[in-house]
Image (tube, grey):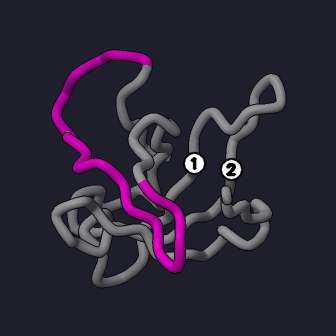
Amino acid sequence: MARFKRISDVYEMKVFTDSGYFFGEVEEALIEENRIKSWKIKAVPGSLLSSKVKDAKGVVIPQKFFKSFGDIIIIQDVDFGGSSSEDDVSEE
């Protein structure tokens, strides 16, 4: 049986990489054509994200990088390199 969550239940959930690092917290979902396209993740003190994006408040991660939603959220490890693809992580 599938387990569904309301989007509002996911806000402020902790996000971890599939390597086990605390990445940040969910700030909001970005919806396009009635589907979640991506998620805004905020950089909180002590998170991997806050150490990578010094002055930014967070990043936008495409839905395809999200692996699991439960008590925590697990995402695929994200590369913060200088690639220019539309599907890459973008700083806020």
Residue under the point 68% across and 38% down: 36
The disc, 1 or 2, on the residue closer to the chain's N-terminal end is 2
Residue 79 forms part of the magenta stretch: yes
Residue 49 appears left or right of 43: left
Residue under the point 50% across and 47% down: 92
Find residue 39 and name its label. 1
How busy is the neighbourhood of tag 2: few (under 14 within 10 Å), some, or many (20 plus)? many
Residue 49 appears left or right of 68: left
Does the magenta stretch mainly form a helix, a strand or a loop?
A: loop
- Amino acid type of the residue tagged 1 in the rendering: Trp
- Amino acid type of the residue tagged 2 in the rendering: Ala
Residue 11 at x, y percent in the picture? 67, 70
Image quadrant assignment for residue 28 = bottom right
Residue under the point 79% across and 63% down: 6
Q: In which quadrant of the rendered image does the N terminus lie? A: bottom right
Question: For the residue labelled by badge 2, is the local secondary structure a helix, a strand or a loop?
Answer: strand
Residue 41 forms part of the magenta stretch: no
Residue 68 appears left or right of 23: right
Mark 1 and mark 2: Cα distance apart in space:
5 Å
Find residue 51 and name its label. none
The magenta stretch spans which residues? 68-86
Residue under the point 42% across and 68% down: 15
Q: Which residue is mark 2?
A: 29
Residue 38 appears left or right of 87: right
Callouts 1 and 2 close, C-beta under 8 Å: yes
Residue 82 at x, y percent in the picture? 19, 28
Residue 57 at x, y percent in the picture? 48, 61
Question: For the residue labelled by badge 1, is the local secondary structure a helix, a strand or a loop?
Answer: strand
